[in-house]
């Protein structure tokens, strides 16, 4: 049994657009529903979602039957965290707050076995190797592991060309919410000053031959970034879509915004 091909990694290397969604509910059932929707990639969010190793595992298992790439965002780029999510079968990893090329270089090492890196050798007892059914996993895993790093501070923007140049970094994801906050525009990512930085960042990333990614809840901005060359673009989140759908349903019956206790009569 060979290591399964990472079609998401192949797509972004071939400059093919991949549309994604954030999973913040931390549960396998909504993840599986999202898996049926037709997205190319889904982010299991360990930074801002209520996830731990077991809930990430459950969502990876729920998505295994569907033609979508689960992307695991770890809370922070610690080697022990990366080792754990790799061993449970994550192969596309998104790391927040990567501010320098040196930091990106160390993340690449954390995803690779010695002598190229520092990943602990133990996948034979884990889901990553199909519990040792992939006999050559240790020799071939690197080919299908995809590293996406987040540039979301002005420090990262200042070193962006060097970050994107690191061999083993497959894509650079621009975090517009944190970036706008770092620039002094908290909650105002649509400010012209922020948009100018984002557009220049996309050009820098693509100019280095790497894929650029981003998430916003604005369709007009997302389409603008796609036109500029962003190739892995997340267009929403399960929580926001679910909340909007339920509130919209309630409002059609005149119930939106009314306190629950008053509606129930107590």
Image (cartoon, helix red, strand yellow):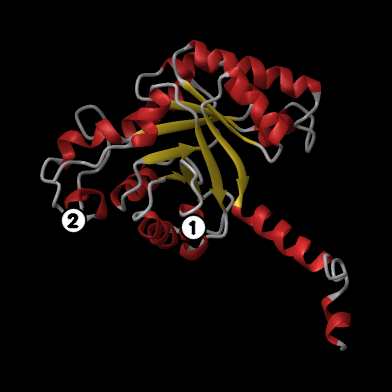
Residue 101: x and y, percent? 46, 20
The answer to whether residue 112 is seen in the rendering is no
Q: Residue furthest bottom?
A: 266
Q: Helix, strand or loop at disc 1?
A: helix
The answer to whether residue 251 is seen in the rendering is yes
For image coordinates 23% across by 55% down, the residue present is 126
In this view of the protein, which residue sits in the foreground, 45 or 206? 206
Q: Is residue 49 above or below residue 100?
A: below
Reading the chain from its start, which is encountered first: label 2 or label 1? 1
Residue 240: x and y, percent? 68, 53
Residue 219: x and y, percent? 69, 36
- For the C terminus, the quadrant is bottom right
Q: Residue 31, which numbered label? A: 1
Q: Is residue 73 above or below residue 229?
A: below
Q: Helix, strand or loop at disc 2?
A: loop
State the separation of the CA atoms marked 2 and 1: 23 Å
Residue tagged 2: 131
């Amino acid at each position: 049994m060979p290591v399964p091909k990472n079609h998401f990694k192949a797509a972004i290397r071939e400059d093919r657009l991949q549309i994604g969604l954030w999973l913040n509910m931390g549960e396998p059932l909504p993840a599986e529903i999202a898996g049926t929707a037709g997205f190319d990639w889904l982010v299991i969010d360990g930074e801002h979602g209520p996830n731990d190793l077991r809930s990430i595992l459950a969502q990876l298992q729920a998505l295994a039957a569907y033609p979508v790439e689960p992307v695991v965002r770890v809370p922070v780029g610690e080697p022990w965290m990366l080792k754990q999510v790799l061993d449970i079968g994550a192969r596309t990893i998104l790391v927040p707050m990567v501010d320098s090329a040196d930091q990106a270089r160390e993340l690449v090492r954390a995803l690779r076995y010695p002598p190229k890196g520092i990943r602990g050798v133990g996948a034979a007892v884990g889901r990553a190797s199909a519990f040792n059914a992939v006999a050559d996993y240790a020799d071939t895993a690197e080919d299908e592991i995809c590293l996406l790093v987040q540039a979301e501070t002005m420090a990262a923007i200042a070193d962006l060309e060097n970050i994107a140049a690191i061999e083993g970094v497959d894509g650079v994801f621009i975090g517009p919410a944190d970036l706008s906050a770092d620039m002094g525009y908290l909650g105002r990512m649509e400010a012209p000053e922020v948009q100018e930085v984002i557009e220049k960042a996309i050009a820098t990333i693509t100019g280095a031959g790497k894929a650029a990614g981003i998430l916003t809840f604005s369709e007009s901005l997302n389409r603008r970034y796609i036109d500029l060359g962003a190739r892995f673009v997340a267009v929403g989140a399960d929580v926001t879509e679910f909340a909007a759908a339920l509130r919209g349903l309630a409002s059609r019956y005149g119930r939106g915004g009314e306190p629950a206790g008053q509606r129930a009569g107590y």
